[in-house]
Structures are given as C-alpha cells and as structure tokens.
Image (spheres, helix red, strand yellow):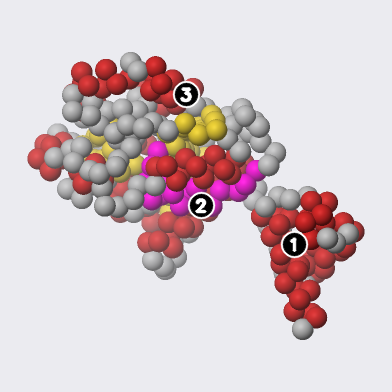
Amino acid sequence: MKQDYKTDLIVKIAKMYYEHDLSQQAISERLGLSRPYISKLLIEGKKRGIIEIRIFDPHEAETSIESELRQMFNLRKAVVIPSIEGSASSVLHRLGVASARYINTIVSDNDTIGVTWGVTLYEVSKSLIHREDLKDITITQLSGGISKIEKNTYSNEILKKFADAYRGTPYMIPLPAIVDSEQVREAIIKDKNISNVLDISMRANIAIFTTGGIGHDSALVRAEYISPREIDRLQAEGAVGDLCCRFIDINGVVCDKSLNNRTIGIDLNDLKSKEYRIAIATGQNKVMSMLGALRGGYPNVLITDELNARELIALSERIA
C-alpha cells in the first residue's frame, strides 16, 4: 500500500513537472514536500520506468518518401507519419501529435501564428506542447468561420488552445467565411475593428492550415455559403477543393474571381509571403486539394500520412 502511494505520488509529480511545466520548487510548495525529495522522486521515476524522456530532433534523417516530397514540391520540410491499421480518428490523432511536435520546434518569442478551422487543426491544437518560456505570441484566424452547421468546426476552441499553449493573445475574425456580395465584404472589412484583426493575420509569420475537399457534403455547402449548384459549376470549371475557403484548381489557381471576392480572410498571394506555411491534411477526399495547394506553391511545410503522401507523388507524376 505504501509503495502504491509512492508510485501515485511520482506520477503526480511527474505530470506537474513535465506536462504542466511547474518548477520543482513550485511543486514542493504545493505538495508540502521538500525540493530535494521532489528531485529524488523524479530520479526514482526514471529508474523505475514510470518516466520516459523522448527527444524529438527536427533535423533527424528524412525518410525516403519525405525527401521525395520535399524535393518534388520544393518544400523546406515534409513530415510523413507511417500508415498503420487503425481508424480515421486514430490517424488524425497521430497526425495532430506529429504536427504539434514540429510546430514546437519553430515557434519563438514575438511570433504571430495564423490558423484555420476544422477537425484537423483541432487535433493539432489538442496536442500542443505548453510553453512557459514564450513571450509576446499572437494567435489569429486566417479566414472567417462557420456558424450554421451541425458539425463543429472548432474555430473558437482552436484559437483558445493555441493561445493557452503558447501564452498568446488570440484574435478572432467574428465573420462568416463567405458573404452575399462583394459590396457586403467591402463594407465589412472597412470597419476599424475588423480591419485590425485582418491586418494581424496579414502580419503572421507562421500560417497553419488544411485543405478542404469539394462536394455537396463540404462544410461550406452545409453552412449554405455555397449552393450544391455552385459546387457543380466549380467542379466543371476544374475546382479540386478549397484552401482558406478559396476554391483552387489542380495548379493552385483560384477558380472563381467573383466568389473569391466575397470571401473574408487571407488572400492566397499573401499566404505565400509567410515564413512558415504549414499544410496539415489526411484523407483520400483531400488528396486533390492538397496537390493543388502544393502545385500552387502555397505550403512550404507538408505534414501528412504515408498513404496520402504516396497518392500525392503518384498523382503529381501522372498530371505533370
């Protein structure tokens, strides 16, 4: 019983120290134990295998498929998680963990991070490593959101989780992704408060986004921003999906100028100016939009799974 209590205590201290970044002195004060005893228990935890230290090296040797992707699409980094048997949610979780690890290696003081919304980015946000050492971090949205939809897009939650992890200040774009007319959009973005947030997204040096597939079940259709008839027309004109709510073709060219001018969020040409442009995506329905984004030169970092990576390479060679 005494040993069980000690094990529980080691686990509790380890979580406080490694997961919540509390100092040994802070833990000592909270638990009413001496700091040397806290240190002793942490050492014992390592010896007993309760605590394992893993070091993620962002410069570690690439796999052959990561190297092929990086060279094929002129990327600064490709991260490919192995494809193993499991549910789609399991793949998404592992992709979120790998993405969070990479992001942790690049984020630093005074960064402004722009994010999109959706299940993929939500998984990333849940896996972020909390950093107490960062200062003056700003988190902003790259595009307007969606409210009229049954399935949660987690736009507010993503923003909050990034801000909590990096001790940052969040800025939300409290607007729909697509409005009824160009005139409405122009009037909205002239508002001082709205334009200030949009200016912050323009200043972001790190952009983190996913790509969306195209079809009648897409989030933009279910939110009634785009009609099924418009989707049919876009597909007939060569659209393969959306990037930051802007529809692109297989070469990354925006498909519909009028629709593009009704969209609230970062312009894709401005996206290209970011220091880090991190595309994170998985799923067979996103392969074409991922390829369009890559061929358009929008991401310079790609994080995906092995199955999608092989599909991207094969498709790119066929369409070249």
Q: Which residue is mark 2?
A: 126
What is the span of residues highlighted in magenta in the rendered image? 116-131
User: On the rendered image, what quadrant is the C terminus found in?
Assistant: top left
24 is higher (above) or lower (below) than 106: below
Q: Give me the residue at 42% from left, 33% from top.
A: 172
Decide whether residue 121 is among the magenta residues: yes
175 is higher (above) or lower (below) than 60: above
From the top left corner, tell me how far across and down residue 92 is, in percent: 43, 56
Quarter assignment of residue 146:
top left
Q: Which residue is mark 1?
A: 13
Gap between marks 2 and 3, in whole Å? 24 Å
190 vs 121, left or right, is left
User: On the rendered image, what quadrant is the N terminus found in?
Assistant: bottom right
The kind of residue tagged 1 is: Ile
Decide whether residue 105 is among the magenta residues: no
The kind of residue tagged 3 is: Ile
Q: Give me the residue at 31% from left, 48% from top.
A: 286
Q: Which residue is mark 3?
A: 200
Classify mark 3: residues with Cα within 10 Å, few (<14), some (14-19) or many (20+). Answer: some
The kind of residue tagged 2 is: Lys
From the top left corner, tell me how far across and down residue 161 is, in percent: 51, 45
- Given contact means CB atoms under 8 Å apart, are the residues at marks 2 and 3 in contact? no
First in residue order: circle 2 vs circle 3: 2
- Given contact means CB atoms under 8 Å apart, are the residues at marks 3 and 1 in contact? no
